[in-house]
């Protein structure tokens, strides 16, 4: 064959292959032998497979969720074709079925692969005796294998389990996916229950009896998903399962709003709305009583209803604080001690700073609160120096809820500081802290906790569980900031209890280093609307509409990038996720500027190399926490490698493909999510479209995130609205009350 004929033949084969592939891509169902497992996650069931398709003959890449895929086995897959930007055409598996072989050769091979210790000779003997329907007979009655003296009871169980597992798994996933559950979630449910030693044929039965068990059993399944499944299996809308699940869901949702409990009236109102049925308050009350009487889910204090864990935590924290407040302390803060420290620091304390020092030194528990430029850092450093000078043998612990705040403490004091989780030595293997009630922090000593306004009820409880009376505790925070993301308003409650010595520091121009932003923030706490003009570390861009705010923000970013700034040098903040100047839109638009799509740049899910990302859920196994910011530094083998800023571990954190919902893009983020962080440059967008969110503490929190420069892209009306609205949203909590009267 000459060269021209070879080219013609190659072109013909290529054309035929394209035609066959085009025809194959129109199919929603393919049948083939699993040639090779490229990737398989035992935890999530996600896998990447190479399927040997016979007609037309070609290897197909299939991706989806199925546990225990078997190389060499034949499957029927249902799904759809997708174009992956890097790996090309892939078949997305939605349902699958293991096809048992129907000829003697295939059955013999199956028995060889399935029964440990059975080779081709013994497998052939079984097939010769039972015939071509051997597997159907074994599936119906595995005991039929007892007639073969070379087959043990263990081996019989092997083949029975394999046949049952694959058949039950395929039936379950097909069935539950038809009820609106994604294949990924179906696989996670299957794997979770198998891990808990629930028989494969019992899994579907268990869910059909009470789908609401999924809420507690499976991570990230909530009431709405369970309720959708319940409707497909015809669970009655008035079922006690459904009502109880709704009540628990409502209380969990309330914690996301910062509440520790809800009054019964609020529960009744929310339950009726969620269930969308006519139901009497008395019926809901009976359900609440039952759940409380069982002592598994709820606790009640008169008409107030708690999730059990939060009720226990609130009482425990109040008990620990009362125990510390009742202890005596011999250390006194004389004028000589304080004057000596002023000379060492070469500084003149403000009257409030002297008050804070005295209360911190002389009391077992004290609180220091104040905004930027009030000298909190100076006071922390001075407390450490005075304490160490007088009690050099004692411990000094410095901690904060976030790594960034801990790093700032360390830089300002010259002493080791760490996150609260690291201080208490969180052990991911037992999902608990090493230090606690049974093993308190070694004393005697001093514990200073900065950014304490970020501590929610549960973290505060865990912290004080590790504190005995031989430790002196100083809590430092800014009560004018937004409260913690989690349940409770711990710092505010402690201050309002009037049981703990409190010092409120005032703005000090000299110690604020001339910061205009610090001055403006402190004026806002007095209800003064700041003058909007460029000055020092403050820059103002006036906008009157949401789309203009978007354009101005993107223009500012282009200028920063042109001036050599990286995405880690600036942070965009917005009150809301939706809208033109909202987080979701800005993240995509900013990424197009600073990290555009590139065929040579690897991607995984919705993330690409060099993306700026934020952790949105605590993962103690990985040592990452809600609000951590990092950068994607590598993507390899379905793994995302993220360099987390200010992490205790310098090594990148690995996020698998099925764990990407722990992250979100972080070029822009909400002001709530920025708590505890500090950025060299902050660009904050505020417009009339953010009306519902415009509160003083939100604007104050956003402004005080700026370390070197704040650029406010705003409508002046929005600033006035925020400053004048100083209403702090009520959080249902009884910590202050319990500190006053005893638990």
Image: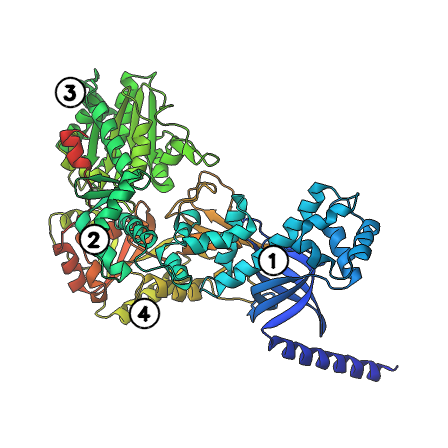
Q: Position of residue 269 (x, y in %)?
A: 20, 56
Q: Nearer the viewer, residue 654 or 676?
A: 654
Dot 3 corresponds to which residue? Answer: 335
Q: Is residue 504 visible?
A: no
Please name whichever residue, 592 or 734, is drawn nearer the observer in this view of the structure: 734
Q: Is residue 733 above or below residue 230?
A: above
Q: Secondary structure at mark 3?
A: helix
- The quadrant of the picture occupied by the N terminus is bottom right
Q: Nearer the viewer, mark 3 or mark 1?
A: 1
Tag 1 residue: 167
**Residue 18 seen in render:** yes
Cα separation between marks 3 and 1: 81 Å
Q: Sequence order check: which comes first, mark 3 or mark 4?
A: 3
Residue pointed to by mark 2: 268
**Residue 13 image point, x, y percent:** 75, 79
User: Between marks 1 and 4, how big is the CA–CA gap?
Assistant: 56 Å
- Left or right? Give the position of 517 relative to 51: left
Tell me the element at label 2. helix
Marks 3,4: beta carbons within 8 A: no
Q: Which residue is mark 4?
A: 551
When the figure is inspected, residue 645 is found, relative to residue 548, above or below; the finding is above
């Amino acid at each position: 064959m000459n060269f021209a004929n070879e080219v013609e033949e190659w072109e013909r084969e290529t054309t035929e292959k394209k035609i066959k592939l085009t025809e194959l891509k129109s199919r929603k169902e393919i049948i083939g032998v699993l040639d090779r497992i490229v990737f398989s996650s035992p935890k999530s069931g996600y896998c990447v497979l190479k399927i040997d398709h016979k007609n037309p003959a070609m290897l197909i890449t299939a991706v989806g969720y199925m546990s225990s895929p078997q190389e060499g086995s034949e499957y029927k897959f249902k799904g759809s074709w997708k174009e992956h930007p890097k790996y090309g055409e892939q078949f997305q598996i939605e349902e699958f079925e293991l096809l048992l072989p129907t000829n003697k050769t295939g059955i013999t091979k199956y028995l060889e692969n399935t029964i440990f210790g059975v080779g081709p000779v013994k497998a052939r003997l079984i097939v010769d005796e039972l015939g071509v329907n051997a597997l159907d007979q074994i599936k119906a009655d595995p005991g039929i294998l007892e007639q073969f003296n070379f087959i043990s009871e263990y081996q019989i169980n092997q083949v029975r389990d394999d046949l049952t597992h694959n058949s039950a798994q395929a039936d379950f996933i097909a069935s539950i996916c038809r009820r609106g559950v994604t294949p990924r979630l179906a696989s996670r449910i299957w794997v979770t229950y198998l891990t808990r030693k629930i028989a494969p044929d019992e899994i579907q039965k268990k869910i059909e009896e009470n789908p609401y068990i999924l809420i507690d059993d499976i991570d990230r399944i909530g009431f709405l998903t369970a309720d959708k499944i319940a409707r497909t299996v015809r669970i009655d809308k008035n079922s006690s399962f459904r009502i109880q699940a709704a009540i628990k869901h409502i209380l969990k949702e309330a914690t996301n709003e910062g509440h520790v409990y809800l009054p019964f009236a609020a529960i009744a109102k929310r339950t009726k709305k969620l269930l969308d049925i006519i139901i009497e308050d008395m019926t809901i009350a009976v359900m609440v009583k039952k759940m409380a009487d069982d002592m598994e889910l709820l606790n009640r204090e008169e008409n107030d209803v708690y999730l059990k864990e939060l009720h226990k935590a609130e009482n425990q924290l109040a008990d620990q604080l009362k125990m510390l407040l009742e202890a005596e302390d011999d250390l006194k803060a004389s004028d000589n001690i304080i004057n000596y420290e002023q000379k060492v620091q070469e500084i003149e304390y403000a009257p409030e700073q002297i008050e804070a020092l005295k209360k911190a030194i002389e009391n077992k528990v004290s609180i220091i609160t104040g905004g930027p430029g009030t000298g909190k850092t100076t006071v922390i450093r001075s407390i450490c120096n005075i304490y160490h000078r007088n009690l050099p043998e004692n411990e000094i612990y410095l901690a904060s809820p976030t790594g960034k705040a801990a790093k700032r403490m360390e830089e300002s004091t010259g002493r080791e500081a760490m996150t609260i989780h690291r201080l208490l030595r969180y052990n991911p293997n037992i999902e608990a802290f090493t230090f606690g009630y049974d093993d308190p922090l070694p004393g005697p000593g001093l514990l200073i906790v900065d950014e304490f306004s970020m501590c929610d009820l549960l973290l505060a409880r865990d912290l004080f569980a590790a504190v005995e009376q031989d430790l002196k505790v100083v809590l430092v925070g800014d009560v004018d900031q937004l409260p913690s993301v989690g349940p409770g308003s711990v710092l505010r409650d402690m201050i309002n209890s009037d049981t703990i010595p409190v010092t409120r520091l005032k703005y000090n121009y000299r110690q604020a280093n001339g910061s205009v932003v610090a001055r403006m923030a402190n004026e806002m706490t007095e209800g003064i609307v700041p003058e909007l003009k460029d000055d020092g570390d403050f820059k103002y861009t006036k906008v009157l509409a949401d789309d203009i705010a978007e354009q101005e923000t993107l223009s500012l970013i282009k200028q920063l990038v042109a001036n050599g700034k990286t995405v880690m040098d600036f942070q965009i903040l917005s009150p809301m996720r939706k809208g033109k100047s909202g987080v979701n839109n800005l993240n995509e638009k900013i990424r197009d500027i600073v990290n555009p799509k590139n065929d040579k740049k690897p991607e995984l899910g919705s993330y690409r190399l060099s993306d700026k990302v934020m952790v949105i859920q605590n993962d103690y196994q990985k040592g990452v926490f809600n609000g951590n910011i990092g950068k994607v530094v590598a993507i390899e083998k379905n793994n995302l490698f993220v360099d987390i800023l200010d992490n205790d571990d310098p090594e990148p954190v690995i996020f698998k493909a099925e764990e990407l919902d722990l992250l979100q893009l972080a070029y822009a983020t909400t002001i709530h999510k920025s708590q505890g962080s500090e950025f060299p440059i902050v660009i904050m967008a505020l417009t009339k479209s953010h009306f519902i969110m415009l509160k003083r503490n939100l604007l104050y929190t956003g402004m005080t995130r700026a370390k070197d420069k704040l650029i406010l892209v705003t409508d002046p009306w929005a600033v006035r609205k925020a400053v004048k609205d100083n209403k702090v949203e009520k959080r249902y909590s009884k910590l202050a009350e319990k500190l006053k009267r005893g638990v």
